[in-house]
Image (cartoon, rainbow, N blue to C red):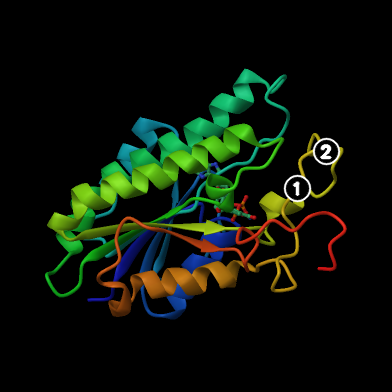
Amino acid sequence: MTKTAAITGSASGIGKAAAQRLLDAGWTVYGLDRAEQTALGDRFAAVRCDVSDAASVTAAFAGIDRPLNALICCAGVLRTGAMEDMAIEDFDLVLNINLRGTFLCAQKALPLLRAGATPENPSRAILLSSLAALRPKVMSGAYAASKAAVTQLTRVMAAEWAPSGVLVNALAPGTVDTPMVRAISDPTASKGYRPSGISPVGRIAQPDDVVDVMMFLLSDGARYIAGTTIPVDGGTGAAFIPVGSNM
Ligand SMILES: NC(=O)c1ccc[n+]([C@@H]2O[C@H](COP(=O)([O-])OP(=O)(O)OC[C@H]3O[C@@H](n4cnc5c(N)ncnc54)[C@H](O)[C@@H]3O)[C@@H](O)[C@H]2O)c1
């Protein structure tokens, strides 16, 4: 039987690239998104789901009638602005989707992930944290808090779930070229928020730079990795580069 993954946020950006890569590698993919999705072929099932809504998440996972080898939680939103006057609705939205939505999906996927695990090949859950969890930036306090919480959830779920064959890890990308980032490229529209931009490697990431690390976490080579958040940031978070330095 082919391997099966559930991917949230599969309509766009990193989640869509992950879905395409797994399909190319022969996996069956359930793509959960609140947005309409492009048809990606016979082994792709598009499932309309709002990850922040418990009933919607319960229904989505109840509709998956086979064990899961992987869960990849990419659904997320960014809302920017100073903490002083950030709209409470924006704060709630960010926490509800990025944190609550990740928790709900992981919890509902767990029985299917346990069913898909074998002693030789544990199932994998990969959660999308962010460099913002490790090095937050001004004008994105709610987002940074949501991603720091995802990183802590990753650690606790990993310790709780590894004994039953489910390895939980997170990725912490820096700036990735996706619609999320393109939407706030104008500092006026983004209420003063600035993405980290070009990394010391000399460019911003493409979704496939992140998906490559996911593929490692899904591989046999990652069978002893649990509870970690791996930066995928081209060195952006490694050292502070003062304004005006020759970099
Ligand atoms: N792009 C970056 O620079 C960057 C950096 C670090 C982390 N991340 C994280 O990576 C993940 C993917 O981001 P992306 O850049 O691909 O963004 P994106 O906007 O391209 O894709 C996000 C997807 O999530 C879906 N989504 C949003 N709210 C949802 C909900 N309530 N229920 C179901 N689906 C929902 C959207 O419809 C969209 O398809 C996010 O968690 C994001 O925070 C992105």
Residue 23 in which image quadrant? bottom left
Tag 2: residue type? Ala
For mark 2, give the secondary structure.
loop
Horizontal side of residue 32 vs 241, given as left or right: left
Residue 152 in which image quadrant? top left
Q: 207 or 86, which is in the foreground?
A: 86
Q: Where residue 216 sits: x, y (%)?
A: 40, 75
- Spatial CA distance of label 2 from label 1 is 8 Å
Q: Residues within 10 Å of mark 2 (few under 14, many from 20)?
A: few
Q: 119 or 15, which is in the foreground?
A: 119
Q: Is residue 81 visible?
A: yes
For mark 1, give the secondary structure.
loop
166 to 57, vertically: above or below: below
78 to 167, vertically: above or below: above
Q: Quadrant of the N terminus?
A: bottom left
Q: Residues within 10 Å of mark 1 (few under 14, many from 20)?
A: few
Residue at label 2? 189
Horizontal side of residue 56 vs 121, given as left or right: right
Looking at the image, which residue is at 67% across and 25% down? Answer: 83
Residue at label 1? 183
Q: Where residue 127 sits: x, y (%)?
A: 42, 53
> So how many labels did they put on this image?
2
68 to 8, vertically: above or below: below
Horizontal side of residue 57 vs 173, given as left or right: left
Q: Where residue 210 sits: x, y (%)?
A: 54, 67
221 to 36, vertically: above or below: below
Lower sequence index among marks 2 and 1: 1
Callout 2–callout 1 Cβ contact below 8 Å: yes
Q: Quadrant of the C terminus?
A: bottom right
Under 8 Å from ligand 1: the CB of mark 1? yes
Looking at the image, which residue is at 69% across and 56% down? Answer: 240
Q: Is residue 50 visible?
A: no
